[in-house]
Image (spheres, grey):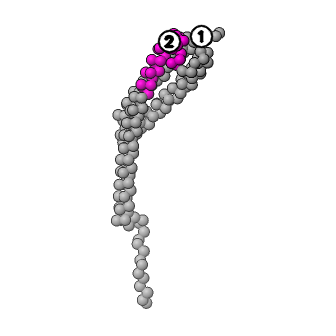
Amino acid sequence: MTKTPEMYMDRLTEISNKKYDLLKEMLLLTKEQALVITEDSLEKLQAFIVQKQEIIERINKLDEEFDVYFQRLKQELKVKNLDEMQAHNIKGTAELKSIVSDIMRLIGEISEIENQNNCKAKELLDSLGNEIKKINHAKVANSAYKGGTGFPTPSYFIDRKK
């Protein structure tokens, strides 16, 4: 059975809608992640990262599938991009272009929040690093005060009189 350009367009739109839904889910996770970037919630943060990675893997599969259908459609219509397809008046082109635009908007929003989250995480790591340095300095000072090793200090002056 030969596929028509409309069938390709329907499939591309369906894939794009699935991707849009996954990106909305990722946006929610990213917003929730922003709320838990603190010292006490590293486990929650790790859980969000795992969930987001799973979504990214699903999006990558959709992107691969989209690319296959898009390449076939471009080959059949002998065009180079989505804008050129509009000249062929294929049903669903405007809808596909709209959902792709929505996807790009969501990606931008996610990216912006991710950048803010990265800054927060860096500040948290710097803060934790400073705390660790303070603890290590305190340990050094404490061990110097106590003598540290538990062994008696060696005597440097030996009385050689008999």
Q: Quadrant of the N terminus?
A: top right
Asked whether disc 1 touches disc 2, contact meaning CB atoms under 8 Å apart, the reply is: no
Q: Position of residue 72 (x, y in %)?
A: 61, 18
148 inside magenta stretch: no
Q: Residue at x 57, y 14 (%)?
A: 8
Vertical position of residue 81 compared to residue 162: above or below: above
Q: What residue is disc 1 on?
A: 4
**Which amino acid, by three-letter code, is at mark 2?**
Gly
From the viewer's perspective, tell me whether residue 120 is left or right of residue 12.
Answer: left
Bounds of the magenta segment = 82-107
Question: Taking 37 as reference, is 67 left or right?
Answer: right
Tag of residue 92? 2
Q: Examine the structure image and report whether residue 91 is included in the region drawn in magenta.
A: yes
Residue furthest to the bottom in view is: 162
Q: Residues within 10 Å of mark 1 (few under 14, many from 20)?
A: few
Label 1, label 2: how far apart the Cα atoms are: 12 Å
Mark 2, secondary structure of its residue: loop
Residue drawn where x is 61% and y is 11% of the image: 3
Disc 1 on helix, strand or loop? loop
Residue 7 percent coordinates (x, y): 56, 11
